[in-house]
Image: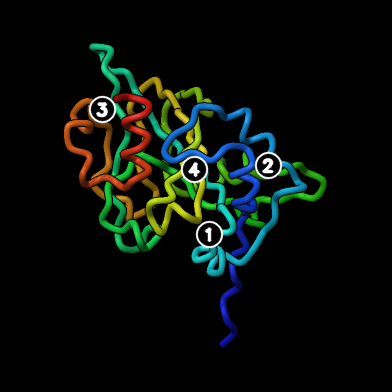
């Protein structure tokens, strides 16, 4: 039986990130970082199993937060628990507010810029993970870097907020469990069960 093909994911050298200004936590300076991080001169596609343990590279990960304003004008955010078959094994059983994943060679098209590949990967990840049955608007609001965890050392999150008119977002993956919109202020009262990236985003954007 032939071995399954190895996924090759989009990465940038950690040194390039550091040259732009290293930070721990959250940064809203998206223009400063993304223009350089998505420059074809810096981007490459490398085997995911190797990149998961090589902190000399950062895997760029879109991280989409769905927000809905309820009738009282309070922020409600879509959240879920990661099941055992969902994504990064080191995050299983953690709660999350982020939808997204790796950008891979599956998202590349001949003649396109790295930014276009990123956008295509973002669309693919959303289509695979959730069903959105409401109009929405989206924007990029920041980046997450967490060098204090083994997962964080090899990933760099690109955070997007999608404002939905109605709270009609549902999982497509069976391993996304206990899903739904929840009042942000309630979540901020107890962040202990959330993955680190979600804790960073909730504090930075809603705290």
Residue under numbered circle 4:
157
Res. 120 visible in picture: no
Q: Residue at x 48, y 31 (%)?
A: 27
- Does label 3 or label 4 sit earlier along the sequence? 4
| Disc marking residue 184 | 3
* Residue at 37% from the left image edge and 63% from the top image edge: 89
Q: Nearer the viewer, residue 145 or 10?
A: 145
Residue 152's label in the rendered image is none
Tell me the distance, in whole angstroms, between the alpha carbons under discs 2 and 1: 18 Å
Q: Position of residue 28 (x, y in %)?
A: 50, 27
Name the residue located 70 percent from the left edge and 50 percent from the top edge: 43
Counting residues from the start of the chain, the first of labels 4 and 1 encountered is 1
Separation of residues labelled 4 and 1 (CA atoms): 15 Å
The residue wearing badge 2 is 38
Query: In this figure, which residue is indicated by the disc labeled 1?
Result: 55
Question: How packed is label 2: few (under 14 Cα within 10 Å), some, or many (20 or more)?
Answer: many
């Amino acid at each position: 039986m032939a071995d399954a093909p190895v996924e090759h994911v989009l990465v940038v050298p950690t040194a390039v990130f550091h040259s732009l200004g290293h930070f721990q936590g959250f940064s809203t300076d998206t223009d400063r970082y993304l223009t350089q991080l998505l420059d074809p001169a810096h981007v490459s596609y490398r085997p995911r199993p190797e990149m998961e343990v090589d902190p000399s590279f950062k895997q760029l990960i879109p991280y989409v937060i769905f927000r809905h304003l309820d009738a009282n004008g309070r922020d409600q955010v879509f959240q879920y628990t990661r099941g055992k078959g969902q994504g990064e094994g080191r995050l299983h059983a953690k709660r999350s507010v982020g939808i997204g994943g790796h950008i891979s060679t599956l998202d590349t098209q001949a003649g396109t810029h790295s930014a276009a590949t990123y956008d295509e990967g973002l669309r693919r990840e959303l289509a695979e993970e959730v069903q959105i049955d409401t109009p929405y608007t989206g924007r990029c609001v920041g980046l997450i870097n967490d060098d204090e965890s083994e997962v964080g050392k090899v990933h760099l999150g690109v955070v997007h907020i999608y404002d939905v008119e109605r709270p009609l977002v549902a999982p497509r993956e069976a391993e996304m469990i206990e899903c739904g919109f929840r009042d942000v202020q309630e979540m901020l009262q107890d962040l202990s069960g959330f993955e680190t990236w979600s804790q960073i985003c909730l504090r930075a954007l809603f705290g």
